[in-house]
Image: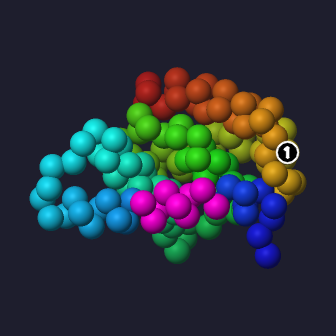
Amino acid sequence: AQTKAMRKTAGPLRVMLAQFREKQSFAQFGSDVDEETQNQLERGQRLNQILRQSPEESRDSTASIILLTLANLRAYKDVPVPNMREFCRKLLTYLHQSEPELWQKIGQGEILSEEIKKELVEALETFRLTWKRS
């Protein structure tokens, strides 16, 4: 059974993925795409990278909620698609080690408040400083 937080987080992403697949099928035929469509395609590619897990890469529900919430907030727009999986792995490690209180709040399974989302985005911005240097 999914937690309230996971249901609330996953809903908009289903729509985003459906739009991505539709746009991707048209883009395959070599038609020129406008900037908005290109952004949607990249967002969909990033989301696919977030959802992809190798067999040895187990992710708990807290980690999934974090990554998907940030996807809903379009917080990954400056991360190159080929770097998404590594970015997510390192982000989760950072949050788990450096923001245990935030991790615990998110792990309670309740729908995330605006305050928790704000804390999450702030933690992401702090992580970005170390990511860009590595």
Taking the spot 21% from the left edge, 48% from the top edge, the residue there is 33
Residue ID at (49%, 69%):
54
Residue 11 visible in the picture: yes
Q: Which residue is nearer to you in this view: 107 or 94? A: 107
The residues colored magenta run 11-19
Q: Mark 1 packing: few (<14 Cα in 10 Å), some, or many (20+)?
A: few
Looking at the rendered image, the quarter that the N terminus falls into is bottom right
Q: Is residue 5 left or right of residue 39?
A: right
* Residue 96 in the image, given as x and y percentages of width and height: 71, 44
Residue 88 against residue 129 in the figure, above or below: below
Q: Where is residue 5 in the image (x, y as percent from the top left)?
A: 77, 56
Identify the residue under disc 1.
105
- The foreground one among 28 and 70 is 28
Q: Residue at x 38, y 49 (%)?
A: 40
**Residue 42 seen anywhere in this rendered image of the structure:** no
Residue 17 shown in magenta: yes
Color style of the picture: rainbow
Q: Position of residue 125 (x, y in %)?
A: 59, 27
Q: Residue extending furthest left?
A: 30
* Kind of residue at badge 1: Lys
Figure check: 123 above or below 70: above
Compare residues 78 and 53 and report the one nearer the observer: 78
Would residue 58 be found to the left or right of residue 81 on screen? right
Count of marks, rendered view: 1
Residue 1 to residue 14: above or below: below
Does the magenta portion include 37?
no
Residue at x 15%, y 64% (from the top left corner): 29
Q: Which of 114 and 37 is in front in this view?
A: 37
Decide whether the magenta segment is chiefly helix, strand or loop. Answer: helix
Q: In this view, does 80 lie above or below 118?
A: below
Q: Where residue 21 sits: x, y (%)?
A: 37, 65
Where is the C terminus found, in terms of image quarters?
A: top left
